[in-house]
Image (spheres, grey):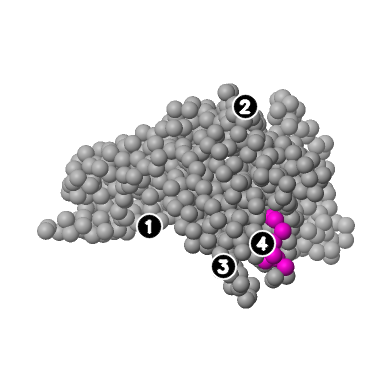
Amino acid sequence: MNRTNRFVRLALLLTAATAVSLNAQPAGKRLALIIGNNAYPMSPLQNAVNDAHSMEKALATAGFQTRVVENAKKADMEAAIGEFLDKIGPDDVVLFFYAGHGVQIESENFLVPVDFPQAGTISAAKFACMSVAQVFDELKRKRPKQSIVILDACRTNPITAKYSLAAGLAKPQDMPKEAYVVFSTGPGQVASDNPDGRNSWFTEALADFISQPSMTVDIEEMMRRVSKSVSDATEGRQVPFKESNLTGRFYFHPPANDVSDVDPNLMQKWMDEASLHEQHGEWLDAIELVGRVVQRKPGGGVEELAKRKLPYLTARRDAQAKFDAGDYAAAAALYEKAIKADPFAGEAILLAADSYLLLDQLPPAVTLLGALRQRGTAEGVERAELMLKQLASVSPEAAKEAQAPTPQPPPIGELFSSTTFGTPDWEAGKRRLASATVDISAYTKELKMEVAMPVLVVTPPAAAGPDAPAGGDPVPAAAPADANAAALAAAIFHIDVVQVAGGTRNLRLRTGAAEEFGYLVLNGLSKETPVLLDSKEVAPSGKLKLAVGKYEVRTMDGGKVVGAQPVEVKPLSIETFTVTAK
């Protein structure tokens, strides 16, 4: 092996291998696991198994693949839930229904199997039951499209009395994302087993509504109707409870004009899932998800992103196949194609450089490593510079690039090429608010300034000599171009990219649509040394917010000006000025 190849192999060791998964998950299944427990030796129930079968029939009309487990022991519950979870894919809707005894132990919910032993301690009782939190944790790991958990398990329970536990179930904690959780009655409350009926009041109403294909309302509206039915039947003694973090609608029976296929939240979920697959090199899965978004044509930024992403993912898939097959020339060309689609794809840049190095083509590899120094993450820049140093002894181009200063990052407009800065996208905002209410104030209230800054309203003079009175009438604010601009200025904050000390960039927040201001920090202020800023005395706060312009800082002694120095405030800058007595 010659010297060049030794350095090539050494450089290649610095990059991570990318694996390809060929096992795409099937999409769009509706899966339901239904458990009904009657046969408790200490306090048997009469309706739970009937409830399970009623739910099975109802869910079958809604397209669910169902499995029913009757009178499950602890091992039966664990096995059934484990098998159910193993079937879940990222685009599935899953539903777990349980009817039987349930209990809260130290604010955690547990489902009671029919072989619950005469446990001697609270800890033993926990291990003898099925933890709802454990089911939640597994749903978080499997990440289905939507999860629905329904527990008709708040019935009068002898376990509660035996261990002096609170009645009913506890409010669900740490739910998985995109989940809808329903209890047959409120937290801490007890539901009736309905001794005069075949089903519990809750399951009877729920199964009845689900069984009607004409009931084309989303789950939120359906639960409202179920709650009213149960409350009416029990004269207000039992009111079902629900907790939801769904970002999109769910229908048991979608209406004919259902627009859920182009729900922007669902489209974004697919894009997020695709990003996770991309991070793991699972190109087929990522391409399938992004392709779905392109086919749905949802419009707006998510469609634009999907259209840009699809050719990149396709090029990465094909490049990986060529690289694994040893066709480095074809792999390099395909990686270059991916980089053209996404110039900030640091991993693609590294793999393209690897391909050229394996072909002993150092100049194009060095060019790519130089591009990574400009466009890569901090980790990518570090790896590129290390590779360049290793190649420097065999490549003059690499030595020159390694010695060059770190290039300036590209403009922010290039980094966010699909964003039009300074121009609000009103239509996108309307679409977003139509699908999910957003309380912006909830976020802005959490923002805190590093230093509380008093505001001194000072307008720089138009043209004043050193002895002329400074100041002048404030310049009136320009009228907003339209009502939308005025509303924008009054309602939200703006983010600016600004230069800061050291030549780097930072993000700063400002309010107002066309506000131009900076900050002036005055050191050395005291009550004994009054300071005038353009004829207006400055309070000893030390930090002022000022309109952009030139000012004169005057130091006073005995009512006389003993020092005058100019200072300029630039947009969004922080100028520091030391006050002296003379």
Mark 4 packing: few (<14 Cα in 10 Å), some, or many (20+)? some
Numbered disc 2: secondary structure: loop
Q: Earlier in the sequence, mark 4 or mark 3?
A: 4
Among the two numbered marks 2 and 1 on one chain, the one whose residue lies closer to the N terminus: 2
Q: What is the C-alpha distance between the residues marked 3 and 1?
A: 53 Å
Q: Which residue is mark 3?
A: 128
What's the residue type where badge 2 is placed? Ser
**Which tag, 3 or 1, sits closer to the chain's start?**
3
For the residue pair 280 and 463, the one nearer the viewer reads as 280
Q: CA distance from mark 3 to mark 2?
A: 42 Å
Q: Which residue is mark 4?
A: 43
Range of the magenta residues?
A: 154-161
Q: Quadrant of residue 321?
A: top left
Q: Quadrant of the N terminus?
A: bottom left
Find residue 254 and report its image quarter. Answer: top right
In the rendering, at what x and y percent does residue 84 appear? 47, 50
User: Residue 303: image x %, image y %?
Assistant: 49, 30
* Quadrant into which the C terminus falls: bottom right
From the image, tell me which residue sits under label 1: 382
**Percent of width and height locating residue 199:** 66, 45
Badge 3 marks a residue whose secondary structure is helix
Does the magenta portion include 53? no
Front disc: 4 or 3: 4
**Residue type for callout 3:** Ala
- Cα gap from disc 4 to disc 1, whole angstroms: 66 Å
Mark 3 vs mark 1, foreground winner is: 3
Mark nearer the viewer, 4 or 1: 4
Q: Which mark is residue 214?
A: 2
Q: Characterize the local packing of mark 2: few (<14), some (14-19) or many (20 or more) Cα atoms within 10 angstroms.
A: few
Q: Which residue lies most toward the front here?
A: 196
- What residue do we see at 27% from left, 44% from top? 320
